[in-house]
Image (cartoon, coloured by chain):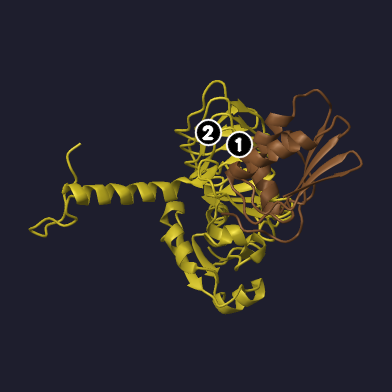
Chain colours: A brown, B yellow
Amino acid sequence: MKITTADETLQVSDLREFGPLEADDLIRDLRAALQPSHSTVEFDFALLRSADCDTADALLAVYAELDRGETARVWRVANPSSDLRQLFELVRLHHFFEITPPRPPRMILL
Amino acid sequence: MKAILICPGYRPGLKHLTDLAPVAALPLLGESLVVYWLVHLASFGAREVIICASDRPWALRELVGSGSRWGLQVRVVTEMYELTAAEARARHGGGDGWLAAPHDVVCADHLPGLPGHPLAEGYADWYTAVQAWCDRAVTPDRTGVRELAPGVRVGWQSMIPADAVLRAPCWIGEKVRVGAGAVIGPHAVIEDRSLVSPGAEVVRSIVGPETMVGENTEVVDSIAWGNTLVNWRDGSCLHVPDEFLLCSLREQSDATEWFRRIAQALTGTNPPLVPADHSPIANPPL
């Protein structure tokens, strides 16, 4: 997992696994890295190997923990596979996260 | 009068649905394409129908039987590929007593009266054709479908709580259970014996038969069939890994039956399938 800043975007990339365990670490790291100047938090799921409801749950936990509604911050899911996008939409995560169009190759869902 | 009905062959554009059944046998507003066509041909005066099927003809044979349900004599013949009308006429036609052309040979790649809506080419076509068919699906041989409000049709024995929101147009099949606060429609179809859990939302989508849509989920622009979720706009497909989000009730009930039998076997209460004296099992008195 890698956290980088580009302009006003805080990007989380290199996410190969993402579940409750990773969410705890991510919340801690993001809390340290997140500045008021960051208008966007982006999760790059290009490398995610597998996903199920735990993935959605973990992502929602990060959002719920870090978004206090103080700033109009954009939360974005970038490069999801088409089936990951469908899963996120099924559990209504697209109401909290802006989801970019899916990347072409499929990933394996557990 | 006689007629020939050519059923669509295997269509890769509907792969995730046609893996379950041939196009002509897929449930569509409670019936199937082949049944709608038989009703249509019967209304035109046909009494004998030859069904040419290249994709799993046994499934169609099982579905239509002898055709007596529609006052027809139906014969399903196996073909190696999907015949053209001319080929079907040459192979099975001849003699007198045929419906006037073009009704003598019908290619069932669309619903009766909707030639502008081919339904077997892709998921978007299937969705569009099903929506267009909603107004015509209550064929003369069907009973039990009520129109609760303009454009809101509900089949018999379905249970809908007072706080569920039904937005026209929508179709809710037979024996469907809708949970509290669920939203169905607009442009939604819930096929027979499905369950839409409390708080779930189904919009511009089709929920297949015996499918459970999980609590508070949102099914939009999709065809949900068992645990398969297909986005009909872009064709992307997800096999939902979590049963509480989306699953087939049929598989669950099979599993339940299996566990019941195992439990009965372990506790020694499993009734024998054949009695000791090998006499047929009589139905217990009601």
Residue B70 as seen in the image, left or right of residue B171: left
* Dot 2 crowding, Cα within 10 Å, few <14, some 14–19, many 20+: many
**What residue sits 56% from the left and 52% below the top?**
B36
**Which mark is on residue B197?**
2
Give residue B82's quadrant in the image: bottom right
Q: Nearer the viewer, residue B72 or A47?
A: A47
Q: Position of residue B61 (x, y in %)?
A: 44, 64
- Look at label 1 and name its amino acid: Thr
In this view, which residue lies farthest toward the right? A7
Q: Please report, as a chain letter, where disc 1 is located.
A: B
Do the CB atoms of the residues marked 2 and 1 lie less than 8 Å apart? yes
Give residue B157's quadrant in the image: top left
**Which mark is on residue B217?**
1
Tag 1's secondary structure? loop
Q: Position of residue B190 (x, y in %)?
A: 56, 40
Give residue A40's quadrant in the image: top right
Rounded to the nearest angstrom, the CA distance separating label 2 from label 1 is 8 Å
Image: B135 above or below B75: above
The mark nearer the N terminus, 2 or 1, is: 2
Q: Position of residue B188 (x, y in %)?
A: 64, 39
Image: B145 above or below B42: above
